[in-house]
Amino acid sequence: MVLVTIEPYGSRVEVCEGSTLLHAIRLAGLSITSLCGGFGSCGKCRVIVISGSSKLSELSQLEVKHLRDSEIRAGYRLSCQVRAFNDVTLYIPVESRVRVGERRAVTRGFMRKVEVKPLVKKIRVQLPPPSLRDQRSDLDRLIDSLKTVVEESKVEVDYEVLKNLPTILRGSNWDVASVLWGREIVSIEPGDAFSESYGVAIDVGTSKIVVHLIDLTTGEVRAVGLAENPQLAYGEDIVSRMTFANISEDNLRTLQLLLINSINELVESVCRQAGVSINRVYEIVVVGNTAMHHFLLGLKTKYLSASPFTPVVGRTISFKARDLGVKSSTGAIVTFLPVIAGFVGADAVADALATGILSREDNVVLLDVGTNTEIFVGNSERMLVCSAPSGPALEGAHIRHGMKAVDGAIEEVSISSDGEVEYRVIGDAKPRGICGSAIIDIVAELYRNNFIDSRGKFRRSYGLKRLRKSVNGWEYVIAWSNETSIGKDIVVSEKDISEVMLAKAAIYAGISVLLRRRGLSERDISEIIVAGSFGTHINPLSARIIGIIPDVPGDKVKFVGNTAIMGADMVLLSIDARSEAEKVARTIEYVELSADPYFSEEFSSALLIPHKDVEKFTLVKALLNQ
Amino acid sequence: MVLVTIEPYGSRVEVCEGSTLLHAIRLAGLSITSLCGGFGSCGKCRVIVISGSSKLSELSQLEVKHLRDSEIRAGYRLSCQVRAFNDVTLYIPVESRVRVGERRAVTRGFMRKVEVKPLVKKIRVQLPPPSLRDQRSDLDRLIDSLKTVVEESKVEVDYEVLKNLPTILRGSNWDVASVLWGREIVSIEPGDAFSESYGVAIDVGTSKIVVHLIDLTTGEVRAVGLAENPQLAYGEDIVSRMTFANISEDNLRTLQLLLINSINELVESVCRQAGVSINRVYEIVVVGNTAMHHFLLGLKTKYLSASPFTPVVGRTISFKARDLGVKSSTGAIVTFLPVIAGFVGADAVADALATGILSREDNVVLLDVGTNTEIFVGNSERMLVCSAPSGPALEGAHIRHGMKAVDGAIEEVSISSDGEVEYRVIGDAKPRGICGSAIIDIVAELYRNNFIDSRGKFRRSYGLKRLRKSVNGWEYVIAWSNETSIGKDIVVSEKDISEVMLAKAAIYAGISVLLRRRGLSERDISEIIVAGSFGTHINPLSARIIGIIPDVPGDKVKFVGNTAIMGADMVLLSIDARSEAEKVARTIEYVELSADPYFSEEFSSALLIPHKDVEKFTLVKALLNQ
């Protein structure tokens, strides 16, 4: 083993001789930008070797390609290329630090209580050895001992398990632990391993991948892993990745392999964190949007990416992990939860599952905001879902100075009645731009102070110091150039405000259409549940002011964090949750907004702040008038 | 394509340019010795090139190793090594002709009538194309259309089928044929392929492999294939092959690959014969003894080969053909029928199935004679089975001039009261030895003429011309040296007779033990069914005289041929037969003869001709006295 020390964090991690530095960084639970997933093709995972450089593998051709001579002289290497054969100290420079700030990544969320009753069962049995009077086959002997757990005639057995069966049985003196996944025997081990039973839950997001290692005996989350989605190298948004995948089978395969490699590193990392052998992981439950689902399974996205947006498969699907190339126990299973439609994926199903909306008797709204915002409306009797085309503005994209919620992003803004601005920045840095939560704050604060009208246009009469006209139209200065790290003013323009309004109108209109279809009014909503990392960081009041969500009392709005991963946890832990997930996907009615006759009307009405029908926002109005 | 003409048969076959001559010979339906299965390691598949030699691939290193210079000059090549790039005429010399004479290979047998109701169903459906009002996934759309055939929530889908689904659906204008194997969709094809549905039945014998291509729509056998078991290179008998396999995993893998390669060539050959695409073969049902079962599945035989002879698995087992490397439709299934015990394999299960003994109300005996003879005794209420250690004498082995039933073997013998011998030889040849059926004739004829006593010892008093004493003891000349092709007398010794008696005693004792356990006497037997190629060629009277089987009237003995392959055919064709096979394996009671207290006593009693208790053989006695 060699010891890798990683600065500026001072993290130390032991890895096998010959491991890559990228592997060490990930094992240490630290993140580094690696768009290509460790293939040496993106050149982003740069590190500076501080000591121990003589015992590293030599400079690879890919490093020569990606690094300038001056950088090489300064000790720069690509962490995915260089292997450590002795102790080494390295430094992750700012430009390589991961852009999904750990601070903002939401790796947990709300989850209903479940009884620990997993589909994976690990049972220890002592078998009688064979004799001339008991010549049952090895398998029958094993299956007979499992009679109380699974009906004998229905048992199936993994081929690799079967091949190893005679050796394991005799090597452990007929005292064995068998692992059942439902009615299939997926592993057979010496008896003393009976208590080690694990599953992995994975939320494959468009920008990040979150992994939980779950102890299937106690129900505990034993370790958490997080990585950037390596497909980012092929586009930030799903559409551009699907476009790339649609060009050729090789491209699709590339996107699939990127995910699989990243998942493998994460699975190794969480197992390592918890001191658990990867051979004790028997099921991996994956959630993600429909495109991620198709990419991971290597299914064509050609027909998903164009109207009428048809997925290849929707229902829960399980494959051998080894057939997909996912590391785990030899006979382990990868299960992808069901998807509802092209733009309502397994992540939304998991949201619904974790929050338990399908067993609510009162009427709830559940939304998970993103480029497409999944919206559920209804109760246990009837639940509708749609995907609203909210676009990326609420995540900071398509905004002049917009950026992701990473170090240097203004994340919170308040504007006083004299037009002065106070803001908070992520990380110990000067501001570089504005992230989604701040954009919403800004629009809400400008409106609250009456600096913009309900159409989002600046009222020029005020003569505000920060309001000015540029070649791009009217804009408001949030940070002066001398405060920023980019050497120029950070501003919000009328066009930016308009982008935010398009986004919020889409979401609000989506909710309205579903309420109408469901025969409900906003007064009937007893709770609005906001899932996902977006909801975790926005100022709820700002969201209400600009009219993203219906105007309900603040205590009726609940932010639940990453419920997608929690839904995956639940399915691993409970067979009841697993069948409920299938029920969610089957019974929830999908509404295609683009085919709804009222959507465009609702959308226009919602294009004002807070709404064309101000009577709908009396609570907000009252708040503003306080 | 190039034309290959094969002499002395005058067969012509077209093959792709670059095909091996071995491939051409097999395609032509002809057999050639190929112990290694075409790897160039046995050097047995020699052919002589008559014309076209200039357009063949050059002499390989393996050919140089296996052929003498003089042979090379004479045009000898190894057919597995040489590839044809233009028309060629070749000659298969006698020494390369397959040792399982086609004349003696039994590729069919008796089979009960079954209703054609296969597990493989091929259904043509016209699907509605997707629209914004019907956004079901491709798979759900397909499954919904199959509702009347299979319960929607239980359908499974092969991963490779899923990957091709979107392309096939759209490429065929939503008119598709789906193939279900039970509840799994194993293929999806353009609608016009709906009538082409095939299965392959395979009987993997210790010495030969028989293949049937079955039309799953009509139930017809469309083509028959036959090859030597290529494992013969690793020993004629099962025990020596298991010994080889037990040495290392590589050895086991070698034996597995030999079988798989041979099966692949046979599957290709039968498909070619019938003009059927290999992609339309959806299930392959295999029978064979327990060792062949383990070899084909790559399962350890270590514990099968020693007491208490424990198989790894007994029950019916199905895998993806592609996981085993067996050629067929991408999603096709290989099913190995259940085995009952270490020495009662799936071939015996298939015998029981094809003959229908389990639905007989009267009591029957079914036997399949080989090195181990499987014996069934009973009726629908209770059926017992055992494996009698009959040894290879009845197949011509362990006999001084014994040989297999191939060209040059004396296959039928009669001896007159003056001691003179008449015989018939297989093929147009001088005799080289004596095969199993003739050995039985000889012992029966010697006994009938009173030349041997009931202990199998020659009565020297007669002064017979052909009886003499050699260094090996007393022997009887069957063919004088001038009649034979080996230049010396072909004889049968007292030791040979003793080998036959050991064999017949084991079989008879096995039957006796089962009758006793079942509470039956020989008088209760209403039929003796003899399965396998052995039974097809012996003289039933000779068998009765020496006491291989109980002394029942001749019309109660039925020879049914290769019922093992027919049982496999039945399972392909009928779901009822499939569940009956499972029932056979589960309900038939296995009796371990070596653990039975009466076996050795019964064995001793049967070591006389016809038996110690001559009262048991009154019918035979009456016949002899006629």
Image (tube, coloured by chain):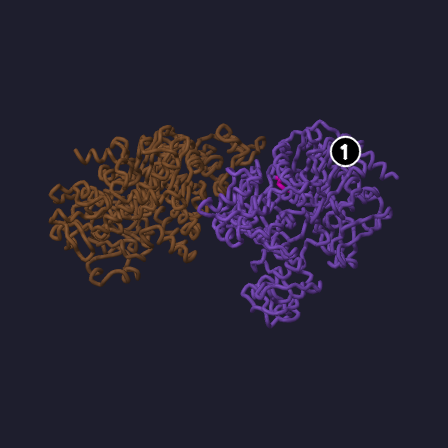
Chain colours: A brown, B purple
In the image, the segment drawn in magenta is B343-347
Report x, y in % for residue A558. Answer: 28, 33
Q: Residue furthest right?
A: B626
Q: Secondary structure at mark 1?
A: strand
As drawn, A617 above or below B132: above
Residue at 69%, 61% in the rendered image? B94
Mark 1 surroundings within 10 Å by alpha-carbon count, few (fewer than 14), some (14 through 19), many (20 or more) = some
Report x, y in % for residue A579. Answer: 44, 34
Residue at 83%, 36% in the rendered image? B621
Residue at 54%, 43% in the rendered image? B145
Which residue occupies the foreground of this view, B78 or A503? A503
Helix, strand or loop: magenta stretch: loop
Task: Please check the rendered image and state whether residue A442 is part of the magenta-colored stretch, yes or no.
Answer: no
Instruction: For residue A195, say whether it is visible.
Output: no
Q: Is residue A604 left or right of residue B81?
A: left
Chain for mark 1?
Answer: B
